[in-house]
Image: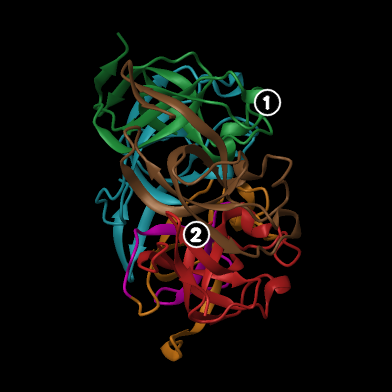
Chain colours: A brown, B red, C orange, D green, E cyan
């Protein structure tokens, strides 16, 4: 999984009917300190995340191992909002 | 999924009969502002996209979760034309 | 899929009997203008491609969606020789 | 698989019930000498690893080939703590 | 598949019983001339390769398409020792 910050939303009609109406959030991978470390990508929101949240996203066939996304053309989902991150024994992020 | 701009088309006869005749569009991943951020790749068009459109592409086994591409040697499809993109509360792209 | 140029051949005995004797071609991903944009990799030839050809390669589990490669330890195949490429309305490559 | 150092932990409630309560460790890929060579990512701990351990992580659908992670939205697991590493005939790392 | 040089070995006890005792070789991807072009990774040896050998490795779900690795948490295997490599009609590598 990647640690990522939700930065926006994509409005688009996906080909698959089953996932129409789901939120397509734009994410940027970050390191634990919140620094952006990757290119933006779009993930289906499974956990009612919002812009600004730090989340976990999972990728590839893993993204279809949920009731909502099973057998759909989806390769990335947000499967957790991060509560806090601890690096080398110190809390480096806590959800406000 | 990736946000991508369609920049061209590939004319080639694919090995698999089931997907012969489909459009093979050349895409470049972009960030939400439209800046190119990745190398060009080729995706099967599922949504009648055209050159210049901003689209979503999905990759890997996800690309075979559609009626057209099931069980075919395809690793990327265009599964939505983007209507608009919103970043940090502002509309940064709107389909014209 | 990736646009790639075939640059050579690997002679090696693969573990899986079913794919022994297939051609293992060395490919380099290119952009539509033919400029190399990625590292070399090896793909199983499905379409009788040769050194110098511009081809499409597909990757991951997609590479096993063919009669020859089903259930074999293969992660990349050449599934088309490119006839021509069109970018922004202009032909940028045509097979000679 | 990647050689990686465990650097921290993510506290978050995953969507899938089956994997709630598992440790979500933050890892950084390293070369055999311990030098960091990649971006941080989060993997489910299968082997009771701790911060500072050098581990092996596996990715993609491979991460779901265990009793714990089968059919769950997980794309990375820690499946071994490394005991020692040998490069060009010399021991370059030994677990203390 | 990637062309890679075997540079060392990892000693670690993998979670899955079926693959315990297999050799976990450290590989570095190379171009056909033998120049290292990627980060080191660990692959299960299927072909009795040794340090110094030039090999082919396959990745992702392809790595589980063998009797030994079926249904195991493995994402990379060595499935051939390279005999020789030919680029643009010239032999650039021959196993000694």
The region drawn magenta spans C35-60
Label 2 Cα neighbours within 10 Å, binned few <14 / some 14-19 / many ≥20: many
Label 1 Cα neighbours within 10 Å, binned few <14 / some 14-19 / many ≥20: few
Say the numbered circle drawn on residue D17: 1
Picture quadrant of residue B90: bottom left
Q: Is residue D5 visible?
A: yes
- The residue drawn where x is 31% and y is 57% is E32
Report which residue position mark 2 lands on.
B2
Tags 2 and 1 on a common chain? no
Chain at tag 1: D
Q: For this rendering, which residue is in front, D66 or B52? A: B52
Picture quadrant of residue B92: bottom left
Q: Quadrant of the C terminus of chain E?
A: top left
Q: Is residue C51 magenta?
A: yes
**SS of the residue at dot 2?**
strand
Q: For this rendering, which residue is in front, C93 or B78? A: B78
Chain at tag 2: B
């Amino acid at each position: 999984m990647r640690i990522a910050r939700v930065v926006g939303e994509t409005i688009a009609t996906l080909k698959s009917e089953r996932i129409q109406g789901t939120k397509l959030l734009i994410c940027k991978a970050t390191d634990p300190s919140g620094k952006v470390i990757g290119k933006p990508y779009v993930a289906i929101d499974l956990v009612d995340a919002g812009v600004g949240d730090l989340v976990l996203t999972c990728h590839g066939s893993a993204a279809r191992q949920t009731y909502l996304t099973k057998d759909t053309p989806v390769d990335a989902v947000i499967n957790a909002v991060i509560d806090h991150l601890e690096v080398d024994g110190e809390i480096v992020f806590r959800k406000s």
